[in-house]
Image (cartoon, rainbow, N blue to C red):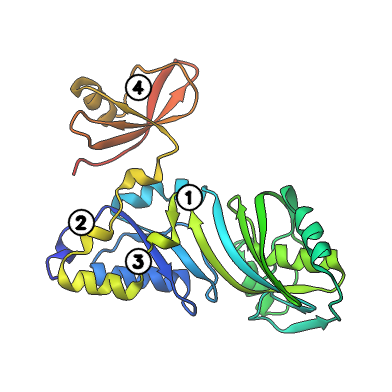
Amino acid sequence: MDSKVGRQPINGILNIAKPAGMTSHDVVDRVRQMSGQRRVGHAGTLDPSATGVLVVCLGQASRVAEYLVASDKVYRAQIRLGVSTDTHDAAGEVTATAEVNVREEEVREALAAFVGSIQQIPPMHSALKRKGTPLYKLARQGITVERESRSVEIHSIELLAWTRPVLTIRVKCSPGTYIRALARDLGQELGCGAHLQSLTRLASGHFTLEQAVSLDELAEAFERGDWQKFIHPIDEALLDFEPVVVDAQMEKRIRHGRQVQGPDAPGLRRAYSQNGDLIAILRHDPQTGLWQPRKVFTAS
């Protein structure tokens, strides 16, 4: 690692291609070690067996992680029909098997039924908490608790390949969607059971797998000292918000947390100085008609 890296703060976003066999926290620890930064976190967990886009935030970028988490996701998934597991993926214990006699037309019809707003029951083997305890810890103790179904949005499902009993699909969905649960429910719909055989996250918001960097590439870049080429600016997490450029007087007010004039429209804005620096995220206050700083970023 470049010895100078640890002494200088890094504020930005990394688009990392997570390998199989590592937890999302493992990836964060690896980035923390190679960058010398303490303030590092990820924006959307991937299961250890899953691969693909893991967005990692460093420094002040951790303050926009919530917007990255809230972005739509795209996955490529292989689903194995005829075998059900307790975790709904290949890592679990087999709980049931069945003959697979379904045709491709039946698979397509069943998949189509999941497109749109659907109710989904989260898996027991998930990071959701019950009274402060992650469900997967309860599941490991043999404890099953009732989970409330929740609404998720499946924007599209494309059947990429079908070689009975395995199908490969491309899914675009809202955050909070469990592809393992989709595999489970598809198996129930087809009457033969199913589990998620493999999963790759192809995109998280604006960040795609084609643009992602591997951990080995990133480590080499930190060793060489040219790691900056992989750091995305903080505002790449805010591209869905309209930009506004403010003058020096408004910038001063924003940095002191005071409201400023702006268009009378609902929503959020990303505010920039006249030098092009990201200053803050502004929220429209309907009571005053002014814009209130929601998050203010330290000047670089």
Residue at image location 28% in from the left, 60% down from the top: 230
- Looking at the rendered structure, the secondary structure element under dot 2 is loop
Could you tell me the amino acid type at mark 2? Pro
Taking depth in this image into account, of 206 and 22 the one nearest to the observer is: 206
Could you tell me the amino acid type at mark 1? Gly
Upstream in sequence: badge 4 or badge 1 = 1
- Looking at the rendered structure, the secondary structure element under dot 1 is loop
Could you tell me the amino acid type at mark 4? Gln
| Residue 300 visible to an observer of this rendering | yes
Disc marking residue 222: none
Taking depth in this image into account, of 76 and 268 the one nearest to the observer is: 76
**Quadrant where the N terminus lies?**
bottom left
Q: Is residue 233 left or right of residue 28?
A: left
Upstream in sequence: badge 2 or badge 4 = 2
Residue designated by label 2: 9
Taking depth in this image into account, of 293 and 68 the one nearest to the observer is: 68
Res. 208 image quadrant: bottom left
Residue at image location 49% in from the left, 16% down from the top: 287
Taking depth in this image into account, of 260 and 80 the one nearest to the observer is: 80
Q: Is residue 74 left or right of residue 10?
A: right
- Establish if 40 lies above or below 117: below
Residue designated by label 1: 205
Residue designated by label 4: 259
- Looking at the rendered structure, the secondary structure element under dot 4 is loop
How many angstroms separate mark 2 from mark 4 (CA)?
Answer: 29 Å
Give the residue at the far left of this rendering: 4
Res. 251 image quadrant: top left
Disc marking residue 213: 3
